[in-house]
Image (tube, rainbow, N blue to C red):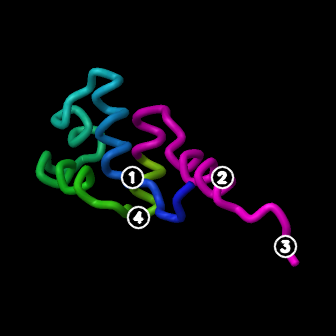
Amino acid sequence: ATNEAPHIGHLIKKELARQGRTVTWLAAQLNCSRQNVYGIFENKWIYTDTLWKICEILDFDFFEVYSIRRQKIKPTSKT
């Protein structure tokens, strides 16, 4: 396992494609420009309130991705 956080922008882009949704559709849902959505795809980080909105829009828990990654790298004991 790696200590590196997941690239959230890539994960959002992948999920949007999996659902067959377009950048234009997501931009309309977020009330922002398509350019802003492309910027989200390129960023490794995102504001939590924006991520929350995207989770709601896509009905996908991106926060769980972080939790799962964290559980995989967490040490087995604390001494």
Residue 47 coordinates in the image, percent (x, y): 40, 64
User: N-terminal of the two: label 2 or label 3?
Assistant: 2
In the image, residue 71 lies in the stretch drawn in magenta = yes
Mark toward the viewer: 1 or 2:
2
Residue stretch rendered in magenta on the structure = 54-79
For label 3, the residue is 78
At label 4, the amino acid type is Tyr
Dot 4 falls on a residue whose secondary structure is loop
Q: Which residue reaches farthest bottom?
A: 79
In the image, residue 76 lies in the stretch drawn in magenta = yes
For label 4, the residue is 47
Q: Is residue 7 left or right of residue 20?
A: right
At label 2, the amino acid type is Lys
The dominant secondary structure in magenta is: helix
Residue located at (41% from left, 36% from top): 57
User: N-terminal of the two: label 4 or label 3?
Assistant: 4
Name the mark on residue 8. 1
